Image: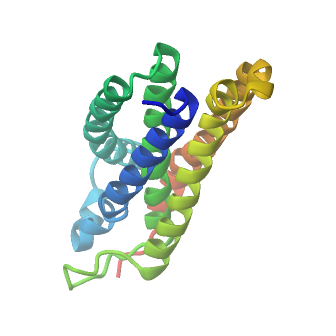
Amino acid sequence: ANLPAGLRFMLAIAGINFLTSSLVAPLSLTILNRESRTFILLRTWPVSSYTVLRDKFLSIYIPLLVMFELLVAVIVVGDRLPPDLAILAAIGTAMVSGTLIGWSMVLSLLFPRLDWTNITQVSTWQAWLLSFIGGSLIGVLEAGFLAIGPMAGTAYAKLATFAPVLTGIGFAIDLAITGGVALLLFVWGPRRLSSIEIR
């Protein structure tokens, strides 16, 4: 409680991002690959590839978002974060969760494994490796950019004047990262899903 609010905010966001990346990868990396040989039936359904990806994304995103937002509420109360940082933490958690889920799903589309027979091997090594490296990097970057303004405003007196500007810049960068992953998943993703060869 003796730490500046900005530093407590950064530690909270970093912890939530780490937990998010740990839980997201096993779920979203395999959500397409688990279709296995029944995947071919998916193409006979009267639904678009976009709808399939959207519903699979939401089936992971909504439950995890509820859980993480409850965790944010506990941290906010426990750390006594001010209301503005509480709102920023809630928005940031929603963005990071969606970004990491989308990133893993994009990788499962890029490196699919739909011919597996061993239930313990439901993803390719490329997807797992890039999900771990990329997910960690995304989590660190989004936490850092989101916390740069609050850190400047409460931990460094000389930068306090620039805190709102830095917060806006950091939020805009995070939004761009999230938007980029969303474009990959929902624009490129349906085309990729329709072109995957079933073996």
Residue drawn where x is 27% and y is 82% of the image: 116
Residue drawn where x is 49% and y is 78% of the image: 126
Q: Nearer the viewer, residue 183 or 168?
A: 168
Q: Is residue 127 above or below residue 53?
A: below
Q: Nearer the viewer, residue 113 or 134?
A: 134
Query: What's the coloring here?
Result: rainbow
Quadrant housing the C terminus: bottom left
Residue drawn where x is 41% and y is 55% of the image: 21
Quadrant housing the N terminus: top left
Residue 80 sits in which quadrant? top left
Can the viewer see residue 183? no
In the image: residue 102, left or right of residue 34: right
* Residue 39 in the image, given as x and y percentages of width and height: 28, 66
- Residue placed farthest to the bottom in the image? 118
Q: Is residue 100 above or below residue 104?
A: above
The mark total stands at 0
Q: Nearer the viewer, residue 96 or 106?
A: 96
* Residue 9 in the image, given as x and y percentages of width and height: 50, 33
Residue drawn where x is 29% and y is 35% of the image: 71
* Residue 108 in the image, given as x and y percentages of width and height: 43, 66
Q: Nearer the viewer, residue 75 or 185?
A: 75
Residue 179 sits in which quadrant? top right
* Residue 41 in the image, given as x and y percentages of width and height: 24, 62
Can the viewer see residue 130? yes
- Residue placed farthest to the front in the image? 2
